[in-house]
């Protein structure tokens, strides 16, 4: 009788274990099958930020995550960005994706409970989005678009050793832009170059700013700035007509008409952020456990049409290993 009792107990225990595992697996499956609601707040409309959004959505789809993307664009208005974030919170989205610094900042201000991811932010610590790059300290994390500025500025020396002064246009209301100007001044000084910065408040200031820079500088460097990105066609037209050598911080600048870059792909950065979203939504990883990530890939890209227009030889040392686009 004792043996039967022991066997019966073992069988019952095994049955409970199987049942428990079945419930756990069922719950995991339900979590994987859930349709998530993701609010995407994009600060402005231009190719770089659009590519971030596309990469983000493509990666989640590739990962098999069933998600509804609610896309809103602030059109460069900080107040509107704040309202978008508040609406996402009231709609109880599962995750907010802030594209560009201000959209990320307003999302953080709107909630300390809903996970917030950001991208296209140069310095998330300076912008007070996270405590540090490795220990974010809250419900916010993401990817930074900090570029290898030292390598990009060094390209000017290869393109034309006579270049001494490099013009930069930056948005005076973006902390992201001010950080880059300060960094450029430091890096340029190491190379024996001088940065000539001109601040603008909106796109309407661009023509006058470019005319001013054309008189004061020998070359142009396009930083990752929303006003610069939104008016890259106009900027490129100005520098190319005056045969001024130009380097952009990222690929979209080159596709918009600047000469070259050795920088990141915003599409790939978006995909990288999408992979982080999957971990949060499906794998139950908390943002506080996820360090801020930097771009994993960079590429050298040259606009062949611009190269020919300003008279740079294709065999120039700066173009080694580059992809030429038309």
Image (tube, rainbow, N blue to C red):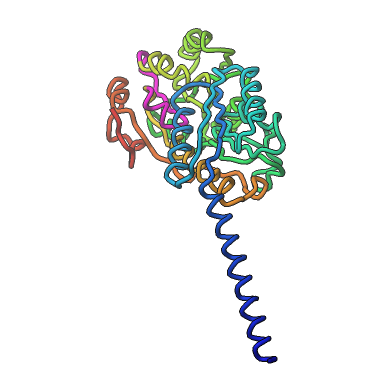
Q: x, y (%) of residue 267?
A: 44, 36
Q: Is residue 101 left or right of residue 163?
A: right
Residue lying at the far front of the rendered structure: 1
Magenta-colored span: 241-256
Tell which of 92 and 118 is nearer to you. Answer: 92
Magenta stretch holds residue 96:
no
- 62 to the left or right of 73: left
As for residue 247 lying within the magenta part, the answer is yes
Which x, y percent locates residue 37?
56, 36
Report x, y in % for residue 224: 52, 28
Q: Quadrant of the C terminus?
A: top left
Q: Image height check: is 28 above or below 7?
A: above
Task: Report which quarter residue 243 is drawn in.
Answer: top left
Q: Residue at x 46, y 34 (%)?
A: 266
Residue 302 horizontal/vertical position (percent): 34, 31
Comparing 227 with 30, the one in front is 30
């Amino acid at each position: 009788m004792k043996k039967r009792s022991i066997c019966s107990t073992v069988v019952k225990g095994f049955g409970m274990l199987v049942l428990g595992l079945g419930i756990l697996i069922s719950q995991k499956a339900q979590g994987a099958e859930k349709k998530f609601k993701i609010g995407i707040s994009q600060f402005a409309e231009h190719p770089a930020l659009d590519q971030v959004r596309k990469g983000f959505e493509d990666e989640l789809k590739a990962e098999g995550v069933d998600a509804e993307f609610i896309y809103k664009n602030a059109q460069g208005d900080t107040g509107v960005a704040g309202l978008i974030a508040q609406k996402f919170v009231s709609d109880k989205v599962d995750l907010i994706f802030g594209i560009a610094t201000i959209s990320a900042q307003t999302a953080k201000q709107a909630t300390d409970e809903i996970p917030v991811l950001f991208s296209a932010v140069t310095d998330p610590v300076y912008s007070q989005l996270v405590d540090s790059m490795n220990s974010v300290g809250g419900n916010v994390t993401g990817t930074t678009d900090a570029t290898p500025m030292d390598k990009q500025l060094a390209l000017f020396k290869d393109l034309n050793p006579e270049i001494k002064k490099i013009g930069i246009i930056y948005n005076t209301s973006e902390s992201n832009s001010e950080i880059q100007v300060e960094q450029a001044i430091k890096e340029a000084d190491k190379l024996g170059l001088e940065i000539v910065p001109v601040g603008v408040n909106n796109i309407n200031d661009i023509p006058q700013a470019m005319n001013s820079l054309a008189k004061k500088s020998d070359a142009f460097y396009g930083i990752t700035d929303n006003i610069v990105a939104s008016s890259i066609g106009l900027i490129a037209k100005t520098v190319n007509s005056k045969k001024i050598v130009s380097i952009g911080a990222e690929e979209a600048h080159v596709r918009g008409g600047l000469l070259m870059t050795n920088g990141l792909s915003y599409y790939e950065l978006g995909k990288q952020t999408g992979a982080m979203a999957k971990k949060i939504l499906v794998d139950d990883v908390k943002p506080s456990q996820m360090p801020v990530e930097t771009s994993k890939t960079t590429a050298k890209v040259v606009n062949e049409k611009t190269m020919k227009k300003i008279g740079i030889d294709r065999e120039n040392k700066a173009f080694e290993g580059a992809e030429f686009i038309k």
